[in-house]
Image (tube, grey):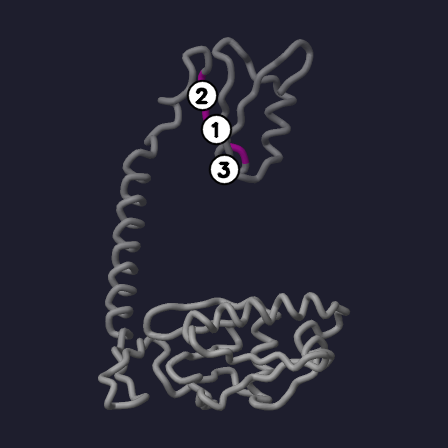
Amino acid sequence: MSTNYQINHVNFDSKKGLLSDSCQQQLLTYTESRLLTLLLERQNDIVSKEELKTFAWEHTVVTDSSLTKSIAKIRQSLSTYFPNDEIIATVPRVGYRLDLEKTSISEEKLEHEDETSIVLPIEKNVGNQAKKLPLRKLFLVIKRGLLVLSIVLLAYSGFNLFRKLPNDYRDYVNNDYSAIDITNNGFTHRIIKPKDFIIPEKIKAILAEKKCNCIFMIDKVGDHYN
């Protein structure tokens, strides 16, 4: 099956469930898009209710009421573009038919077209021909501009961050605490402790086992060291 259909001036992207022309867009649900796709594939033929339900809802069992409501929503969306045409006809007790006797349809793959083009109607005497207004260059310029702006903002943020980092962590220690450096096995341990607190040897032995350049805060609460 094709993923793109053209009903006169209206394009239907079945993959996205999108009906659109040069002025407006209508978005269908997944189920509604499946129903319309099958009716387009079988245009002017009667498609039974059971076949429509099986195709649109796949492994889910639904009632005729659900199908009727979905068809009504599709008709409402199509009426935006074709206010005077009843494109989907009801075949009582049987199913539905996409009646395109007055509305031509073409079916095509659109990979070769520019996805960023906008189709604009020309004068009436040109028929269904349209001109495309390429927007790719404009989008590229905007995209590059946003990229450059992002890089500038990141650079400025980094500059402010490093400018404000403290040169010496001791400048930010509370007045009730002091900070010292102890070197063990080639690693420097920066220790923050209460001013009158003497680090016991067993704590120093524990820190000596830590093979990292780290900052520790040591305090004593009762008989416990934190």
Based on the displayed image, in which of its 4 quarters is residue 71 positioned? bottom right
Lower sequence index among marks 2 and 3: 2
- The residue under label 1 is 190
- In the image, residue 152 lies at what x, y percent? 25, 52
- Secondary structure under tag 2 reads strand
What is the spatial separation of the Cα atoms under label 1 and label 2, in whole angstroms?
7 Å
Q: At label 3, which amino acid type do we have?
A: Asn
Q: Is residue 65 above or below residue 162?
A: below
Based on the displayed image, in which of its 4 quarters is residue 123 positioned? bottom left
Q: Nearer the viewer, residue 52 or 115?
A: 52
Give the residues drawn in magenta, as a range: 178-184
- In the image, residue 182 lies at what x, y percent? 49, 28
Q: Nearer the viewer, residue 37 or 183?
A: 37
The answer to the question of whether label 2 and label 3 lie on touching residues, with beta carbons closer than 8 A, is no
- The residue under label 2 is 179
- The residue under label 3 is 213
The answer to the question of whether label 1 and label 2 lie on touching residues, with beta carbons closer than 8 A, is yes
Main SS of residues in magenta: strand
Label 2: how many Cα within 10 Å (few below 14, some 14–19, many 20+): some
**In magenta stretch: residue 125:** no
Which residue sits at x=56%, y=73%? 33
Lower sequence index among marks 3 and 1: 1
Label 1: how many Cα within 10 Å (few below 14, some 14–19, many 20+): some
Q: Quadrant of the C terminus?
A: top right
